Image (cartoon, rainbow, N blue to C red):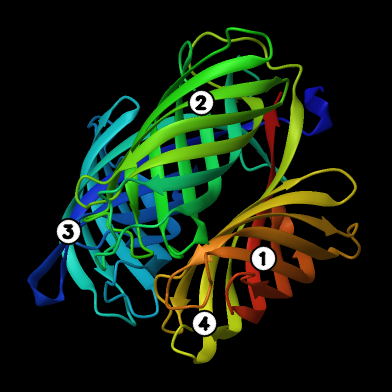
Amino acid sequence: MGLLAGGLPEVLEVRTTVSAETLHLPQHEALGLLGLSGTADLGPFYLGPGLYGAARGERGGFFTFGLEGGTRGRPFSSLPLELDAGCFVGGGGGGAAPQGGGLMLRPHLGASYVLGHLRLGAELSRVRFPNGGIDSTQAALTLAYTSKRLWVPVGGWGPGFEGPVVWQGQTLDLEAVRVDPTSSAHTRSGLPQPVFDLAGLALTHDLSGPWFRFLSVDGAARGSSSGYAQALAGVGLRTSPAALFGLEARLGAGMGGGGNVDTGGGVLFSGEGSVTMGSGEWRASAGLGFQRAPGGSFDSRTLSFRLVHRTSVPGLEGAGEALYDFAWADWRLGSGLLVYRHAQRQDGTDGAIQVMTLRADRLLDSGFYLSGEAGSATGGGAGGYSTGLAGLGWETPLWARQRLFAEAALGAGGGGGLRSGGGLLASFRAGWRLALPHGLGLEAMLGKVRAPRGNLDTTTLGLGLQLRFKSLER
């Protein structure tokens, strides 16, 4: 498809940042916190999703995610120094930490040394839970990697790009994992750790040759460990000895905990070997592996199944080819606030809670779209409650800048003292969308969230803000 089909693409600078800091909790307790964010530069500002989790101490399973935003720049062009001021706003908790309703604020000031694509830096940050018992100021170390991507914003935000590109493979994986603990694994209560199932998503991106990197996020969907969540990143190796069959190996590290699973401070290691089958854009895989928490007793064997969708995206590094023979992918990214009107709790009470959501929609033909959403409690005394959902939606054609929509999704969620059973969740919504200039949009919705294996069954109300754009793939 030619360039005139959607307008000229523009260059978007994307930054992946890892941070490490130590929080000071009440009773002289220390909590080692790792952060991971992926932000995009939009003029003088940046914005993107962020994730923070416990990696040292006794609060394994403490997670928060939300939006990271701010401004950064190099005030002296002759010096390799970059200054940064920003704030994270999100929700979460867990690990029996004093997070209250779950709302987390993390303003920061920082400086970094520029080394090509890398940034080595330090920050002064403050982590505060306004309706909880965490309020800590500390220094943080950061490591960031910058890269460039192509996108097509609605209306155009900058000069068009017509240079050469290098096409790089990437996949989106829907995954289900059976976790079978060894005999030495026990819960935080001291009982033998039972089997449980995870559901989640993984993203991979090809490196040189047969190597790739991956990021996966999963939550408990079945068993007695509702509220358990994990986020893993690592590298892998894939080969295809036959046309329809392939082999993969993955090694990862990250954070995990919650659901009474004894992961100690939260650090988690994983490994896996798998067999893949398929051709073209779609593949399926099955694998055997392990997970181990060195700070706790959690040690398990894993059996994983994945449904994999593969595409290629244009990169701007290295000698490439002319930009041609590609397709447009229509996307919508957004964030919002969802209110559970009567969330049933383990203690027999119910009440309203507030959940911050981050979502991505891939628009298809005839008004259909695929959706992925993560949510975490920010109010109502349910800190630690988090969800991950994937589903299908449909919206009407645009009239007078408005659309109506309906969608259904399945996923995992738990924690925060809610009655979510083993963690499996179902969500149904209908609502209204209003298109604004520059691809922005507002939405309002009414729906229901239900845990089929628990007693959570509540009406939901929500408001959200979205950004629509196109990306390039083939």
Q: Nearer the viewer, mark 1 or mark 4?
A: 1
Q: Position of residue 17 (x, y in %)?
A: 35, 42
Badge 1 or badge 4: first in the primary sequence: 4
For residue 57, the mark is 3
Residue beneath label 4, please? 353
Q: Position of residue 100 (x, y in %)?
A: 34, 80
Identify which amino acid the numbered label 3 is placed on: Gly
From this view, report whether residue 154 is shown above or below residue 429: above
The residue under label 1 is 426
**In the figure, residue 137 lies in which quadrant?**
bottom left
Circle on res. 215: none
Which numbered disc, 2 or 1, marks the residue closer to the eye? 2
**Which mark is in front, 3 or 2?**
2
Q: Which quarter of the rendering shows the N terminus?
A: top right
**Residue at x-position 28% and y-position 57%:** 186
Residue drawn at x 35%, y 52% as measured from the top left: 256
Going from N to C along the chain, the mark reached first, 2 or 1, is: 2
Q: Please report whichever mark, 3 or 2, sits nearer to the chain's N-terminal start.
A: 3
- For the question of whether residue 43 can be seen, the reply is no
